[in-house]
Image (spheres, rainbow, N blue to C red):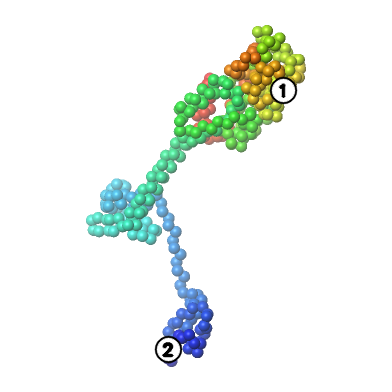
Amino acid sequence: MPRAVLRPDRAALPVGVRVGSAPAVVVGHTAIDSAAAAATMEPRPATRPVRLELRHLRYFVAVAEELSFTRAAERLHIAQPPLSTQIRQLEEELGAQLFMREKRRVYLTQPGREMLERARAILAATAEAKEAVLRTATGETGELRLGYVPSAMFTEALPGVIRRFRKRFPRIQLYLHETPSVDQLYALHNRELDVGILRRPDMSIPAGVRMEEWYQAPLIAALPKGHRLAARDTLRIADLKDEPLILFPRQSGIGLYWRVVDLCVKAKFRPRVAHETRDYAVMIGLVSAGVGIALVPSDTQCIRLAGVTYRPVQGKDAVSAIQIAYRPDHGDEHVTHMLEALRAVRA
């Protein structure tokens, strides 16, 4: 039978081939539809994913720098045959020849030179990452989130701890958060803070949070100058029974509120609230303005206004304690370092 000749006209086309149909494959005298041909062909193997390991990169860099498998094997403290095998496997995985091999020496190809630059960068970045993680794990670097109530900064204790901590651990980023006591406890529970410096509020401590007393300061009365009680050397809580008092708002979560109310209740009266404020400086300013009397920690005397005088308050319960709060399961060396610094002051 004569061989078929492909022409634009329909009559010359082999049987089964149509103009405008899918491309055909002609085998001998027979035209086969490409879809059918594809179905009969052997499937091509999928490209293997590149599986590079750091050891491949270390071996490659050693050979590339020594330009000798023998010297590279000595440098790596391994036998030469396994090294050659690893390099061949690397080349197969990359699909590129990295070395030109001669009898006594090897040379880097252009892909090899490209690979050398990138392999060095990867190994350097890996070593740097390892060192950074180790420094963080041992508490040398990293970050720590410290919450505090504003009055704690009136003491020399907390500023001193922060100053020494920053000097000892300059590579730890210390984030300071001025936060009411209640909010600190919830933030510790949710792991949004690492350590809290606060006054114990009248509430249940959230699960997973531990508190320990750290610092005590006696309470004093801030009085307007010229007030009749200012003539006394010391005051009792009972002396404030009929006096207008400036307090923190109960809903503010400031722990000193409950302490003052508890002292008034024990003295058998309910405080007569003249004004509420969340800020110690504003509170002392209101005293200076004659609005009322405020019970504040003794460290607050650092706020000096011409119209204010301070007097000690009698009674062993007339103290304000600052607490350390943290999670015992923190598992963080940064937190351990901070707790040690705080406890050293307490001791």
Nearer the observer: mark 1 or 2; the answer is 1
Relative height, residue 103 to residue 289 (above, below): below
Residue highlighted by disc 1: 275
- Residue toward you, 136 or 20: 20
The answer for how far apart the CA atoms under marks 1 and 2 are is: 110 Å
The answer to which quarter of the image holds residue 290 is top right
What's the residue at 68%, 7% (across, down)? 231
Residue highlighted by disc 2: 3
- Residue toward you, 6 or 86: 6
Q: Do we see residue 78 in this rendering?
A: no
Where is residue 68 drawn, in percent x and y? 27, 52
Which quarter of the rendering shows the N terminus? Answer: bottom left
Three-letter amino acid code at disc 1?
His
Disc marking residue 243: none
Q: Is residue 166 left or right of residue 327?
A: left
The answer to which quarter of the image holds residue 206 is top right
Relative height, residue 168 to residue 11 (above, below): above
Relative height, residue 305 to residue 115 (above, below): above
Where is residue 14 drawn, in percent x and y? 48, 87
Q: Residues within 10 Å of mark 1 (few under 14, many from 20)?
A: some
